[in-house]
Amino acid sequence: MQITKIILLWIVTDLQEGYSNETKCNVQSTIVNCCNLALTTIPRHLPVNATYLDLFKNSIRIVPGFTFQTLRYLTHLHLERNGIQVIEKNAFHGLHRLRSLHLSFNSIKLFPAGTFDRLNGLQELSIDNNKLQYLQDNEITKILNMLKIMSLRKFSFDIYPNFKFPSQWGTLSELTDLGIFARSAKVQFNNAMFAHVNLLKIMSLSIDVVPFISEDFFEHFPKLDSITLSIGTDLPKNPIDQVFKSFGVFRGRNLTSIEINTGRFDNGFTLNYKRMKYLWSICLKRLTLNNLYIKDILIYAMQEFSIKSTCLEYLEFSENTIFDRGASVIAVMNNLKNLKVLKITRNWRNSKSKRSQQSSLFSFVLPKTLEELYVEHNMGGDMSDVEVINGFNLRVLSLKDNEMWSCIGTFTGITNVEYFDMSGWRCEKLSINLLYGFPNLKTLKASGSHLGKGFVNLAGAGSFLSKNLRLKDINLSFNKINSIPDGLLLRRFEQLSSVNMSYNNLKIFPKFHASIKTLKIIDLTFNSITRFNDEDIEHIESLENQTDSVWVKQFHDKVNSMGFELCLHDKDFIAGESIAVNVLNAIDSSRKVIFIITHEFLKSSWGSYEMEMTRMHAFQKGREDMVIVVVKDDIKITDMPEVMKNMWIKITCIQWPNDDNLPYNTEEIFYEKMKMSLQRREDTTLLYSRNSVI
């Protein structure tokens, strides 16, 4: 069985060197992630082939001129949430291929003339949530004149009272996605905004803070297909009635999505007939009502909505305070003839203070078309038997973070569910039949569900997964499991790939059935396992088939016999640290780095990460001779990652003998070459290695 992809990074080390902030950036091929590193300046010496640079949430106050001129392949640049105060002239010089530029949530007061010159391919620009306080129609015009961009498709900016769309917007013929951020409670979204323009070809409109909106506001958006309105929380009056009335413009129209969110007012509001009627007159596919302080949903209004909303495929009520309407609201959903996804999450929080004697889960009817059902952080009670009608098409069922005080029931009527999430339950009382109703289950999420105590209290707990032999991924983390019930994982799982048992109290390696041929990841981090005994190692090796692990061990033993001390990942990486930190620390203190190149290595994202980190360390510090590459499999140079190709001429490469008939192509000569490459001139032979399991 292929239990893992084994990546071996051999690290020969004898000196410690400092690590700068810029080398902490995560480099994956041409993607550079420098988020949230407390950087005060933009790092220098970034990979010149970078296409994506993310500097989100640092402390960069100034963007100097010509900062990015060496990054001529850059297409995406993120500088949000840095507190940027100054954009110097020519700051973006050389970024001729840039397609998206994000400057939101900073303290920019102005853009120097020419800031956006030659960004002729720019498609996305966000400058909202800055301090461009006089950004009225004339200031917007100045920015548009600077842009001179016909290709701009997505634009977000701030507006203040009395804003009017400038006539120059007519030149932005490709603009389809618009984000408007109202920076004053006096802003009014009405027809006066369109005094200088006729009709806007916007397809997606997002408005953040809606103090007032007129009934005819949307008349100037004939192409509009998607609407997101974030109402705001600091307004003197809740404009929710105006919002619903404004949708009357779309009567008889087709829309993909309407989302209304973030309208927290003390008195809340009720979803009643007079509000809902504006929605069911639209052929709407997606409706999201999130964090609005909805305190009640009238059943008659919802019933009418469910009958008349014939196009609806996605419906979500989240982060509200709906009381005592859980079962009754779901009960009328079966009238939605095309609904595929239903999310009702984090609503009835205030109604769960007392333990119910009867679970909120019982027999209920679903829309026949429903494929995904999320009822999360809403209910409390004792789990009982659940009968679902019309559940044949259901594939995803998430009931996580509901306060289930016992798990003694079972499910019927949803035999095709492939994903089930019961994380956050209290399964100290557990039924052996809980998962028997899911014979096609592929993913089980049961993190933090008190299963440790549940297994102890359950007779025959080893049969808990006996009806779920199609499982691919199992997550039993954070369950205070002291020992795996006998036989729990000794099943003939047909396609088991990943088992997460981290953050438990396991002291021994769990036993798996030897017939499993697909297992790749076993996560046992943060348990009480102190060592693998011979039996554990034998069991692990019995699970492995057609991996690189056997070769790695042979290589390790041979090089070790030469007098080099080897540091393997399994025995030498610091427990509790992330793989990334361990890799970086190892590379930083290394004299030699050996990459064993196999087909599995090339598939791994960690392989690219390790190579890029090594390249940055080696070539920034003038230590190009530290890298050794062993090509184990039959791999062409053209198939190597770009980062390896870029440093190919400066590295030592040794080919593992794949054809004994060729002269000088023997294991003996291979290891002689290896020894010569590892030895320093003064014959000091301190050596470390890494064997990373992905």
Image (cartoon, rainbow, N blue to C red):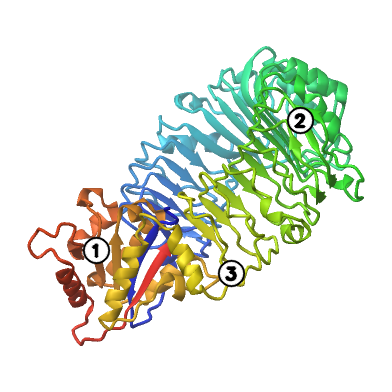
Q: Position of residue 216 (x, y in %)?
A: 70, 19
Q: Position of residue 532 (x, y in %)?
A: 51, 72
The local secondary structure at tag 2 comes to strand
The local secondary structure at tag 3 comes to loop
In the rendered structure, find residue 425 and report the number of the disc placed on it.
Answer: none
Binning the other alpha carbons within 10 Å of mark 1 as few (below 14), some (14 to 19) or many (20 upward) gives some
User: In the rendered image, which residue does mark 2 sit on?
Assistant: 388
Q: Looking at the image, tell me whether mark 1 or mark 2 is earlier in sequence order.
A: 2
Residue type, label 2: Val
In the rendered structure, find residue 630 and report the number of the disc placed on it.
Answer: 1
Does residue 616 show up?
no
Residue type, label 1: Val
Does residue 185 show up?
yes
Disc 1/disc 2 C-alpha distance (Å) = 57 Å
Please name the residue shown 24% across and 68% down the image: 628
Please name the residue shown 21% across and 59% down the image: 648
Dot 1 and dot 2 residues touching (CB under 8 Å): no
Binning the other alpha carbons within 10 Å of mark 2 as few (below 14), some (14 to 19) or many (20 upward) gives some
Residue type, label 3: Ile
User: In the rendered image, which residue does mark 3 sit on?
Assistant: 508
Q: Observer-nearest residue: 187 or 352?
A: 352
Residue 232 appears in which quarter of the rendering? Answer: top right
Please name the residue shown 66% across and 18% down the image: 311
